[in-house]
């Protein structure tokens, strides 16, 4: 279809970062770093709070934040989508509650 990118092949089909990283423009670095700091300032306390509410070790909240960011960077393609801790933490909370039952 017109306007669509060509189908990815090989590793780029499974790990999109392989396709877009070579086209990354250096002028985006400052903005991306500022966004990363801002998101970290919001996500880390939120994840720590959710871990505390779930009754699990607080460092698990940090692991959830780091894992979400790394997985998203490797396997997702849109630079306009934001990730957050809610899905990961709600899963952790559910697991912690099931273990206590």
Image: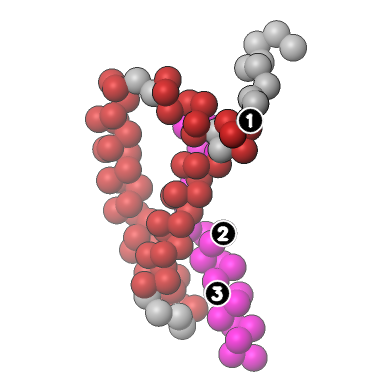
Residue at position x 36%, y 72% in the image: 59
Look at mark 3 in the image and give the residue it sits on: 93
**Nearest-to-viewer mark from 1 and 2:** 1
Residue at position x 40%, y 79% in the image: 57
Q: Earlier in the sequence, mark 2 or mark 3?
A: 2
Q: What's the image's color scheme?
A: secondary structure
**Observer-nearest of 15 and 73:** 15
In the displayed image of the protein, which residue is found farthest to the bottom? 101
Q: Which labelled disc corresponds to residue 10?
A: 1
Look at mark 2 in the image and give the residue it sits on: 87
Badge 3 element: helix
Q: Which quarter of the picture shows residue 38?
A: top left
**Nearest-to-viewer mark from 3 and 1:** 1
Q: Is residue 99 visible?
A: yes
Residue at position x 42%, y 71% in the image: 60
Above or below, 22 against 80 in this view is: above
Q: CA distance from mark 2 to mark 3?
A: 10 Å
Above or below, 43 against 56 in this view is: above
Q: Earlier in the sequence, mark 1 or mark 2?
A: 1
- Magenta range: 76-101
* Residue 87 inside the magenta-drawn segment: yes
33 displayed left or right of 66: left
């Amino acid at each position: 279809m017109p306007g669509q990118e060509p189908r990815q092949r090989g590793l780029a089909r499974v790990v999109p970062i392989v396709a877009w990283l070579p086209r990354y423009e250096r002028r985006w670095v400052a903005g991306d770093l500022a966004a990363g700091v801002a998101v970290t300032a919001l996500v880390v306390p939120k994840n720590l709070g959710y871990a505390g509410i779930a009754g699990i070790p607080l460092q698990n909240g940090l692991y959830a934040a780091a894992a979400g960011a790394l997985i998203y960077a490797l396997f997702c393609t849109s630079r306009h989508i934001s990730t957050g801790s809610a899905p990961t933490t709600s899963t952790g909370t559910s697991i912690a509650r099931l273990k206590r039952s």
